[in-house]
Image (cartoon, rainbow, N blue to C red):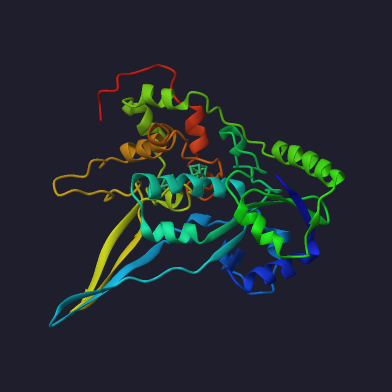
């Protein structure tokens, strides 16, 4: 893997160059909520304040509300218009935990069935990672086998080595991006050594440790323990914030808007925390809150790994930081009862 470097002062120029042919997105605060937004062509102040966005980067591929198509009826019948989304985009500064989140969501929208809306955005995107230099107290990525410098899920990976960034070229797409610029230089052995010690230091900065060993087995064992799940769920208010802001949650609802003879079909984020989620004609399968809380935890650490061989949590800690009642998923993982009970109850 080739490594290059660039001075921090050159970042605006580099983004400007890419911005000529791609839609460049960077971390930005709108009403104090950090998210990945279209770069204004000037502001790179995120390099000073950026920790991790509040809205995860999944929103750039699975927006909170998306028009799937619009329709109109006339004397010939219905006419459908599908929006074309072929714009190429470059997302600069995604943290490794969120890049892993996207790699997980990819599995749902490509392996179970190919979702054209999601796939076209993914296909047209270059992801540029930025090592995490300032994890929150609630972050526990290292307990899930991730590092704050993990580069596996991006095209280029930038790591802070002082006045410069070391750049790892991970994919051909990433390599091509750098090929056409004189702003980057070859990294030296000394730069490599600096990056190595920086990476070790960054991993040590993730203080929160959660025991995730055999978590799926432990969840299976306590699945029917209603008393336990009732206690766990007690203070949750079913607001859905944890699922909306989780980089690996992907549930959506579909609705039609119809006015006279024209309208549109939309899909928007949904949450297994809601009482009305998956409401069926006869019943809601998870009417009680404890069942919904259990579903969220088991889905992440038991069902998803069963289907895709990967845990659907990156340890980004958002659901802990942003829950209005301080409900903490890491405490649940640490408090699973030791005794096994039968798996018959559903
Ligand atoms: S954010 Fe907190 S209160 Fe809201 S649904 Fe999630 S756990 Fe419950
Ligand atoms: S469950 Fe919580 S910690 Fe895990 S990825 Fe989702 S938001 Fe982050």
Quarter of the rendering containing residue 115: bottom left
Q: Say left or right for 19 vs 12.
A: left
- Residue 2, above or below 142: below
Q: Looking at this rendering, what residue extends furthest in the bottom direction?
A: 75
Q: Quadrant of the C terminus?
A: top left
Q: Say left or right for 306 vs 54.
A: left
Spot occupied by residue 225 in the image (x, y as percentages of width and height)? 33, 25
- Residue 188, above or below 263: above
Please tell me which residue is depicted at 61% across the width and 50% down the height of the picture.
171
Quarter of the rendering containing residue 262: bottom left
Quarter of the rendering containing residue 111: top left
Please tell me which residue is depicted at 52% across the width and 35% down the height of the picture.
330
Between 214 and 342, which is closer to the camera in this rendering?
Answer: 214
Residue 334 visible in the picture: yes
Q: Say left or right for 339 vs 11.
A: left
Q: Quadrant of the N terminus?
A: top right
Spot occupied by residue 58 in the image (x, y as percentages of width and height)? 48, 55
Residue 62 visible in the picture: no
Between 10 and 2, which is closer to the camera in this rendering?
Answer: 2
Between 286 and 73, which is closer to the camera in this rendering?
Answer: 73
- Residue 311, above or below 244: above
Between 111 and 333, which is closer to the camera in this rendering?
Answer: 111
């Amino acid at each position: 893997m080739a490594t290059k470097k660039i001075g921090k002062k050159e970042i605006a120029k580099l983004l400007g160059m890419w911005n000529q042919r791609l839609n460049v997105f960077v971390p930005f605060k709108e009403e104090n909520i950090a998210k990945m937004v279209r770069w204004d062509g000037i502001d790179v102040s995120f390099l000073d304040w950026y920790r991790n966005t509040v809205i995860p980067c999944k929103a750039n591929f699975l927006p909170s509300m998306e028009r799937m198509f619009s329709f109109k009826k006339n004397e010939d019948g219905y006419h459908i218009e599908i929006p074309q989304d072929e714009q190429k985009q470059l997302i600069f500064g995604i943290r490794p935990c969120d890049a892993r989140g996207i790699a997980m969501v990819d599995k749902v929208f490509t392996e179970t069935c190919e979702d054209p809306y999601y796939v076209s955005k993914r296909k047209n995107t270059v992801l540029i990672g930025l090592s995490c230099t300032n994890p929150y107290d609630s972050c526990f990525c290292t307990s899930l086998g991730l590092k704050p410098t993990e580069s596996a899920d991006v095209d280029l990976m930038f790591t802070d080595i002082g006045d410069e960034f070391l750049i790892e070229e991970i994919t051909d797409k990433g390599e091509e991006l750098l090929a056409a610029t004189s702003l980057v230089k070859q990294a030296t052995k000394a730069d490599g050594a600096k990056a190595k010690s920086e990476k070790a230091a960054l991993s040590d900065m993730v203080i929160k440790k959660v025991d995730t060993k055999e978590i799926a087995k432990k969840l299976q064992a306590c699945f029917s323990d209603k008393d336990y799940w009732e206690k766990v769920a007690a203070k949750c208010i079913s607001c859905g914030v944890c699922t909306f802001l989780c980089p690996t949650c992907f549930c959506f609802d579909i609705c039609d808007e119809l006015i006279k003879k024209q309208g549109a079909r939309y899909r928007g984020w949904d949450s297994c925390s809601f009482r009305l989620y998956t409401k069926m004609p006869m019943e809601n399968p998870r009417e009680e809150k404890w069942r919904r809380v259990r579903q969220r935890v088991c889905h992440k650490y038991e069902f998803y790994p069963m289907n895709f061989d990967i845990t659907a949590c990156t340890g980004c800690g958002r659901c802990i930081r942003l829950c209005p009642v301080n409900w903490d998923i890491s405490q649940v993982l640490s408090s699973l009862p030791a005794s096994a009970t039968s798996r018959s109850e559903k």
